Structure formats: C-alpha cells, structure tokens
Image: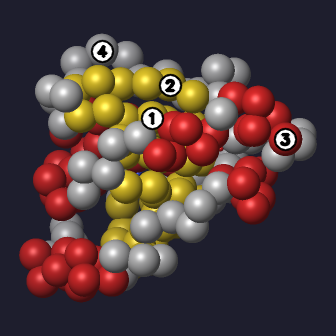
C-alpha cells in the first residue's frame, strides 16, 4: 500500500486514520533515510492519540517513553548504536515483551536482536513530498482490513 504525503498536514491526516487501526501491542519499524520523516510520523501518531506535550527524537536517548490513557508507547531510534550488544545492555527484549506499541527508527542497527516487526512504514523523499509504503510482516489480516478501511488520503 503506497500513500503520497504531500505536506506535513497530509502526515497529520494519515496519522489520524492509522492510529485507531493499530493494535495496542505491536512492533513497527520506520524505514527511510536521514530526514525522511520517520520521527515526524511517530509524532503525528502520538498527537492523534491525544499526546499534548513534546515528541522529541530519541536520537540521543535511544528511547522515549509515553503513557497515554494506559497505552504504553516506546519510540526508539537506534541510529547511534554501534554494536547490537548495546541493545542487550539496555534490555531491548524487555521493552518488546511488554504490552506496548514499539516504534523503531533505524532498526537495521539492531540486526538480529529485534524480533520481526508486525508492520513496516517506509518513507522516501521525492521532490518536497514523502512516499509512504506500508507493509506487513505478520498480522496480514489486520493489514488487509486496513485496505478496506481506506487509509488513502
Ligand atoms: N510529509 C512531509 N512533508 C514535508 N516535510 C516533511 C514531511 N514529513 C517530514 N517532513 C520534514 O522532514 C524533516 C525531517 O523529518 P524527521 O526528523 O521526521 O526525519 P527522520 O526520518 O526521523 O530523520 P532521522 O533519520 O534523522 O531521525 C523535518 O523538517 C520535517 O518537518
Ligand atoms: Mg528521526
């Protein structure tokens, strides 16, 4: 499923549609180059969920944690990971094992230490726009259901 996000307001609109369709426990990888819009999309999703405060990039902290109406959300950015072992030290599996939504930027740096994601959101920059491709790894039924619900803008 491919969706064109022509502007930040498209990202906001898309996040408002996607948020209610996400399972309360899921692992989502955000792929794309530096500046592709991964953090921006997670920020929009959190705002759709009613988060009022800041959403800062976890580039330096590795993980930012949110608690919204009893829904736990972890937002990871593994860009600065040099060795997947660093993830063992932070107890990455413990995060993944909790009843939470986990969003992961730069998951490829975590290599085999991460379980396979349920969904992948891939962002590509072209002109001033973003092309978002959604795919599923597991959870095919949910993904197909999304298509029916029309996530297109
Ligand atoms: N749909 C969009 N339309 C226009 N600009 C966008 C869109 N999405 C994001 N941007 C802009 O792209 C820039 C980079 O976004 P962002 O920080 O989310 O990228 P990132 O993929 O998280 O990068 P990094 O890999 O460095 O963490 C920001 O200035 C943001 O406003
Ligand atoms: Mg980012």
The residues tagged by marks 2 and 3 sit, at their Cα atoms, a distance apart of 20 Å
Q: 124 or 21, which is in the foreground?
A: 21
Task: Single out the mark in the foreground, 2 or 3.
Answer: 3
Q: CA distance from mark 3 to mark 4?
A: 32 Å
**Residue at the extreme left:** 149
User: Looking at the image, which is closer to me, 80 or 92?
Assistant: 92
In the rendering, which numbered label is found on residue 74?
1
Residue at the spot 41% in from the left edge and 40% down from the top edge: 98
* Residue 53, label in figure: 4
- First-in-chain label (3 vs 4): 4
Q: Where's the N terminus, which quadrant?
A: bottom left
Residue in front for this viewpoint, 120 or 69: 69
Name the quadrant containing residue 48: top left
Image location of residue 26, percent across then percent down = 37, 55
Asked if residue 6 shows in the view, the reply is: yes
The reply to whether dot 1 and dot 4 touch (C-beta < 8 Å) is no
Q: Of 143 and 32, which appears nearest the observer? A: 143
**Residue picked out by circle 2:** 64
Residue 75: x and y, percent? 49, 36
Q: Given contact means CB atoms under 8 Å apart, are the residues at marks 3 and 4 in contact?
A: no
Give the number of the mark in front: 1 or 3: 3
Query: What is the CA distance from the residue labelled 1 to the residue labelled 3?
Result: 19 Å
In the picture, measured across the screen, residue 40 lies left or right of residue 52, that is right
Render colour scheme: secondary structure
Q: Which mark identifies residue 85?
A: 3
Question: Residue visible at 10% across and 75% down?
Answer: 149
Q: Is residue 89 left or right of residue 69?
A: right
Label 1: state its secondary structure: strand
Q: Residue at x 47, y 46 (%)?
A: 97
In the rendering, at what x and y percent does residue 70 appear? 19, 28
The quarter of the displayed image where residue 153 is located: bottom left
| Percent position of residue 24, x then y | 25, 49
């Amino acid at each position: 499923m491919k969706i064109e996000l022509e502007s930040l307001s498209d990202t906001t609109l898309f996040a408002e549609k996607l948020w209610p369709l996400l399972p309360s426990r899921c692992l989502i990888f955000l792929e794309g180059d530096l500046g592709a819009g991964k953090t921006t999309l997670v920020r929009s999703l959190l705002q759709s969920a009613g988060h009022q405060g800041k959403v800062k990039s976890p580039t330096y902290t590795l993980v930012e944690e949110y608690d919204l109406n009893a829904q736990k959300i972890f937002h990871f950015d593994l860009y600065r990971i040099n060795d997947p072992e660093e993830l063992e030290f932070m107890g990455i599996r413990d995060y993944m094992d909790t009843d939470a939504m986990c969003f992961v930027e730069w998951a490829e740096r975590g290599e085999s230490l991460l379980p396979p994601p349920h969904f992948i959101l891939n962002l590509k920059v072209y002109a001033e726009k973003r092309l978002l491709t959604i795919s599923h790894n597991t959870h095919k039924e949910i993904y197909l259901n999304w298509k029916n619900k029309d996530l297109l803008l």
